[in-house]
Amino acid sequence: MVLWISFAVLAAAVTWAVTRPLLRTGTTSERPADGDLAVYRDQLAEIESEKAQGLIGEPEAEAARTEVARRLIKRSEEQESAGGAGTASVVRQVALYGASALPVIALGIYLAVGSPMLAGKPYEARLKAPLEQASEADLVAKVEAHLRQHPEDGLGWNVIAPVYMRQGKLQQAAEAFERAIRLQGETPERLGGFARATIMARDRIVTADAQRALERILELDPKSIEPRVWLAIAKEQEGLLAAAETAYRKLLGEVGSQGPWREILQQRLTNITVQQGGEADLGNAPSAPEIEPGKMAKYRAMSPQERQEVINQMVDGLSARLKKDGKDLKGWMRLVRAYSVQGRASEASTALADARRNFAGDEKSLAELNALAQSLDIGS
């Protein structure tokens, strides 16, 4: 507490020292207004006296009176200007005094609404905190400190990798999974984590490293669906649309009508079918653009950029509708999948959070949303 008060006083003192010179005003010669008038009256009286004595003529007297009047007017203008400068000086003083008081005011607000008595928690103390009192950040710090001293501890990398994934630290997660694989061996779980982290870190591009990991998973677990989905997507990304279409159709026959991957596969199949000029069954693809059959030819004739604009408009329209009718669970799931397929990860996460808020307390709906989030890797 004393430290914070000292900081506020020091800040106020520094502000005052810096701004104090600005309060100084230039020195001006000040003459009482009444004294000026007396001088000008004497000059006018002297002019009249000299005229009466015949020392000067009427033209000279008039010229002298005009000059005195000019000086009087000029002096009046100077008086008014000095008055305005005085007002400006007062305003400036108030502003500078206020600036000096700001640190003290800020301290008062902090003492009223802040937590000045909250004990600090240095990094070293967090590392030594008991496990039952530690937060997730504390536990991560402990593991990181341990791994810096023991980088060959495969179990540590295996523990921290999924935590990085959940925190959105995708590149760190990929590196941690890779070290865990090197030190502890290949398992479908570690290989799958490495592949997902790598793909997400590259904006959902299935890289060569990810493909090798996915293929290795299939060697260890041939019935696994997820690696086959990503490998089919890799074919699509490489432009092998016919091979991707075949893979999608085969997977759709295996995942069942309620499988978590079904709608993603249907969306992908719809997209590449339209790209190849086929008549896609868009009505069965909840996250695909709902194009009327009569407009399909026009859609196929569009450029890829134009098609994407049409899809974006439909997705944005769905988003706008759900803001008005937030109880449409299938609509929310369709929106989340659409954002995910388009690579709009941030918007997918936001839509998922909005959906969860709309179905708070509805355990069945929340379970479906959680299963969707897990299948898409867009939320915890």
Image (cartoon, rainbow, N blue to C red):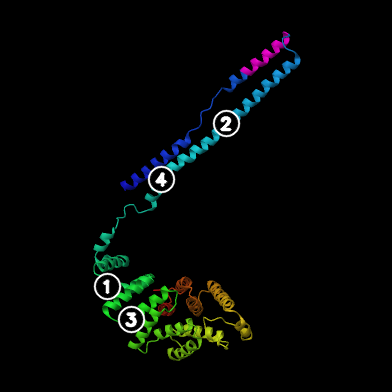
Mark 3 vs mark 4, CA separation in Å = 55 Å
Amino acid, disc 1: Gly
| Image position of 250 with respect to 41: above or below | below
Image location of residue 318, percent across then percent down: 55, 75
- Give the class, few, some or many, for how many residues have Cα within 10 Å of label 1's Cα (few <14, many ≥20): some
Considering only order in the chain, which callout, 3 or 1, is on the residue closer to the N terminus? 1
Q: Nearer the viewer, mark 3 or mark 4?
A: 3
Mark 1 vs mark 2, CA separation in Å = 77 Å
Amino acid, disc 2: Gly
Image location of residue 211, percent across then percent down: 39, 82
Q: Secondary structure at mark 3?
A: helix
* Callout 4–callout 2 Cβ contact below 8 Å: no
Mark 1 vs mark 4, CA separation in Å = 46 Å
Q: Secondary structure at mark 1?
A: helix
Q: Secondary structure at mark 2?
A: helix
The residue range painted magenta reads: 39-53
Q: Which mark is residue 379?
A: none
Check disc 1 and report the residue beneath it.
156
Amino acid, disc 3: Glu
Residue at 62% x, 85% y is 297
Considering only order in the chain, which callout, 3 or 2, is on the residue closer to the N terminus? 2
Q: Which mark is residue 103?
A: 4
Check disc 3 and report the residue beneath it.
189
In depth, the one of 97 and 53 nearer the eye is 53
Residue at 37% x, 71% y is 171
Quadrant position of the C terminus in the picture: bottom left
| 236 left or right, relative to 216 | right
Check disc 2 and report the residue beneath it.
83
Considering only order in the chain, which callout, 4 or 3, is on the residue closer to the N terminus? 4
Amino acid, disc 4: Pro
Mark 1 vs mark 3, CA separation in Å = 15 Å
